[in-house]
Image (cartoon, helix red, strand yellow):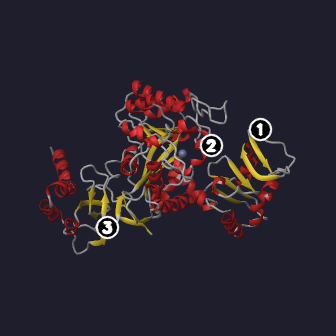
Amino acid sequence: MTHGHDLRLFRTRSYPIRLSRRAFVAAGLGAAAAAMAKWQVEPDLVLYNGAIWTVSDRVPEVEAIAISGGRIMAVGTSAEMLALAGTQTRRLDLGKKRLTPGFYDAHAHPVFSGVEHLRNVACDKSSIEAIQKDIRERAAKTPAGKPVLGFLYDDGKTPQPLTRWDLDKAAPDHPVMVTHRGGHTMFVNSLALKSAGITDGTPQPEHGQYFKDANGKLNGRIADAGMESFAKLAAYEPSRADFRQGTALIAKMLVAKGVTSACDADGSPATVQGVQDARDAGLLKVRMYNHIGGPDLDKMIAAGLHTGFGDEWVRLGAVKLYADGSISERTAWLSEPYKDMPEFRGLQTSSPEDLYTSARKAHLAGWQIGVHANGDLAIDRVLSVFERLQKEAPRRDPRFRIEHCTLLNADLIRRIGAVGAIPIPFAGYVYFHGDVMHFYGEERTRHMFAMRELIDAGIRPPLSSDYTASPSDPVMWLQSLVTRTDYQGHTWGANQRITVKEAIRAGTLDGATASYEEHIKGTLEPGKLADLVVWDQDLLSTDPSQLVNVKVQRTMVGGQWMYEG
Ligand SMILES: [Zn+2]
């Protein structure tokens, strides 16, 4: 009896939020004001005079929002919310600006990319001169002979590809190695070639290439297995401090784009520690859901941990397993060969037995399972494993994740729905990687990143970048999904277009659902975390072909402004 009594008390104490939700959204101000007085709650902040898209079906559009203790206390008209304000309440006039929930990047590699940003020169530039300038600056701060590393380079986005001579001009006294953001080519200077012992006469590597110019001289472009000798020159083991600082840096970059939650899609105890360290230091501006790579699963199970452990800032995600290769590097495992490679249908990266054994172990230990699968054959294999697990050891609401889940067909979509799996597609690939879509051909791209078909089947795929593979940039995602047109103006699979409202919901609420967090985030409703973005233009009425130009004005996470433009 005592127990029951305590429980009732606890419920009563947490009631104001539920009362205020009912009262403000449904019944009106009077009853809620009484509840507020009773518990002496007044908002810390009222945002008013806005165009607020809540992503809630009940009250999709409101003018104002009251925030207390990092959570949303109430939503409604400006007059209703201002009437709640007390003497300590701050008020912010939104000037009719569009506000949405914060976005969720449901598959990225924030910790490792943060470490790369700390150490490497970002070469995502459209001119050779701009890249040379940054490499020159980094070289000036680096002892001669020590490597200068670049990343995020895309040779499709500069007038011509970088050469060793371009890099020599910037930094002749340092080995310079610039990796392509797709990860399977790099561009190096003369000193790097010399340090690696590669000359014009060196035989070509098996499964790789040292590219040469018309005169037979090495031009500095290196592919695949050829990169191994350079990887040794650049080798680097991040320290605990690197993981902390890298996480802090990437979190700052993400909130500036309107991302307030991210899934770190292949973490380890060391990366989770980095995220916790950043949080302890007050530097974590983005909430993180941390997948753990398969090789660390036993360690985590032995520690008694499973998916969901943590809190709304740092939480354990799924175990991450792999079934095939990648889309942008042409190694996804396909039923039909690649366009210009009649013999090649991609790579399987695990055997069916290994995939089943690891997945079963995780399933039985209470882990969510996230399997990387891009090609239709890989997705088929992953679904077979999920179907078998649910038959042998059914779990309620396992929310199996198919990370990427790129190339689909009607039967695969039916099976995804039946087993309750969640596809996590790339959101910006059509826009950003339009230059590789011809590997797949027009017909096949009608069934890639199949948002329209998935949503029509009642499935709710979230949005993701796989950063650094593509930018973690919600406005780019929206433009890509709504237009299915790349940055050069070519349209791929117009049949998969979705509306901007559908895309916003996918990028917010559906991301939260994929990590069992829909009760605390993803919509702007009373009781949920105050994670939101103020945009400089109205996402809902902007010409879809101009969405990439919309900027974030401010980003709030947990009631704090984490970014102000
Ligand atoms: Zn990934």
> Is label 2's Cβ within 8 Å of ligand 1?
no
The residue sitting at the bottom extreme is: 87
Query: Which residue is disc 1 drawn over?
Result: 206
Q: In the rendered structure, are the residues bearing label 1 and label 2 in contact, judged by CB atoms less than 8 Å apart? A: no
Q: Nearer the viewer, residue 45 or 281?
A: 45
Query: Given the image, on which type of amino acid does mark 1 rest?
Result: Glu
Query: Given the image, on which type of amino acid does mark 3 rest?
Result: Lys
Determine which quarter of the picture holds residue 123. bottom right
- Where does the image place residue 224, in percent across and percent down from the top left? 70, 44
Disc on the earlier residue, 1 or 2: 1
Disc on the earlier residue, 2 or 3: 3
**Mark 1, residues whose alpha carbon is within 10 Å: few (<14), some, or many (≥20)?**
few
Q: How many marks?
A: 3
**Mark 2, residues whose alpha carbon is within 10 Å: few (<14), some, or many (≥20)?**
some
Q: Quadrant of ligand 1?
A: top right
- Where does the image place residue 370, in percent across and percent down from the top left? 48, 39
* Discs 1/3, front: 3
Q: Is residue 183 above or below residue 336?
A: below
Disc on res. 329: 2
* Discs 2/3, front: 3
- Where does the image place residue 155, in percent across and percent down from the top left? 66, 54
Q: Nearer the viewer, residue 36 or 336?
A: 336
Query: What residue is at 41 percent from the left and 38 percent from the top?
Result: 454
Quadrant (top left, top right, bottom left, bottom right) of the C terminus: bottom left
Disc on the earlier residue, 1 or 3: 3
Query: Which residue is disc 3 drawn over?
Result: 96
Residue 378 vs residue 10: left or right? right
Disc on res. 44: none
Query: What residue is at 46 percent from the left and 60 percent from the top?
Result: 257
> Is label 3's Cβ within 8 Å of ligand 1?
no
